[in-house]
Amino acid sequence: MNIKEELKEVKAYFTPKIITEVNDQYVKIAKIKGQDLPWHNHKNEDELFYILEGELLMEIENEANRTMKTGDMFVVPKGRNHRVSSLKECSIMLIETKSTQHTGEVESTITRSIQEQMY
Amino acid sequence: MNIKEELKEVKAYFTPKIITEVNDQYVKIAKIKGQDLPWHNHKNEDELFYILEGELLMEIENEANRTMKTGDMFVVPKGRNHRVSSLKECSIMLIETKSTQHTGEVESTITRSIQEQMY
């Protein structure tokens, strides 16, 4: 499976696509554009962000903002309030425990079930 | 942390470098050149391979060989005998459960402890 090919299937922003699983983790890809993702946290799960292409603004509560660029990797520790956004389209890879809800316990217009992330 | 910068620290082939952890998994990078890695398996752990740059020959017992290229991702399921090699230098990302021994139960000249993978 090739990441660039998989990215072509991702049409909607903020809608992760599960591309494979390894042990108890899902590997997902997503495209980010805009500020639709609400502040949220994952109580018990770390979340890894890896920038495939573009720039991502990573905001974490009580920390300085980070501008992530292609090839950058960052892990948001469990329980930490965070939000990501991007002015232009940004493609990312995510690693999350299978139990992780991608918008935490916050229900928003972009919230998708695990089933909806398998496309 | 940037993957390209981290790769500059990796000088020896077949010597994974742990770059971060997410939940119960290590994210590692490595450079592969040659055929020094023996056939091995990880009894209880899947192992994810993602090609950052170059070509990797992925051999799995009783399966057709796979030539993996930049951007390709493949998960070797737990318990499956496998071996990777490359004629030219290939840079890869790995995701492994923290308990995974990188050459399985096979001790070889390239076997490194977890401590030795933290550089």
Image: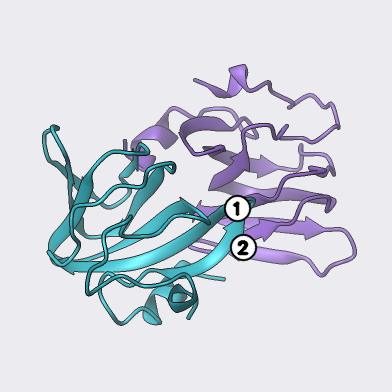
Chain colours: A purple, B cyan
User: x and y percent of residue A5 in the render?
Assistant: 34, 35
Q: Amino acid at mark 2?
A: Met
Against A92, is A15 above or below?
above
Q: Residue visible at 70% across and 42% down?
A: A34
Residue A13 falls in image quadrant: top right
Q: Confirm whether circles 2 and 1 share one chain.
A: yes
**Residue that numbered label 1 is attached to:** A49
Residue A62 position (above or below residue B23)? below
Q: Position of residue A51 (x, y in %)?
A: 53, 55
Q: Please give left or right for residue B38 compared with residue B70 in the image.
A: left
Residue position for label 2: A68
Which amino acid is tagged 1? Phe
Whether tag 2 and tag 1 are in contact, CB under 8 A, the answer is yes
In the rendered structure, the answer to whether residue A58 lies left or right of residue B86 reads right
Q: Residues within 10 Å of mark 2 (few under 14, many from 20)?
A: many
Q: Residue at x 12, y 64 (%)?
A: B35
Q: Name the chain under label 2.
A: A
Which of discs 2 and 1 lies nearer the camera? The answer is 1
Label count reads 2
Q: Is residue B4 visible?
A: yes
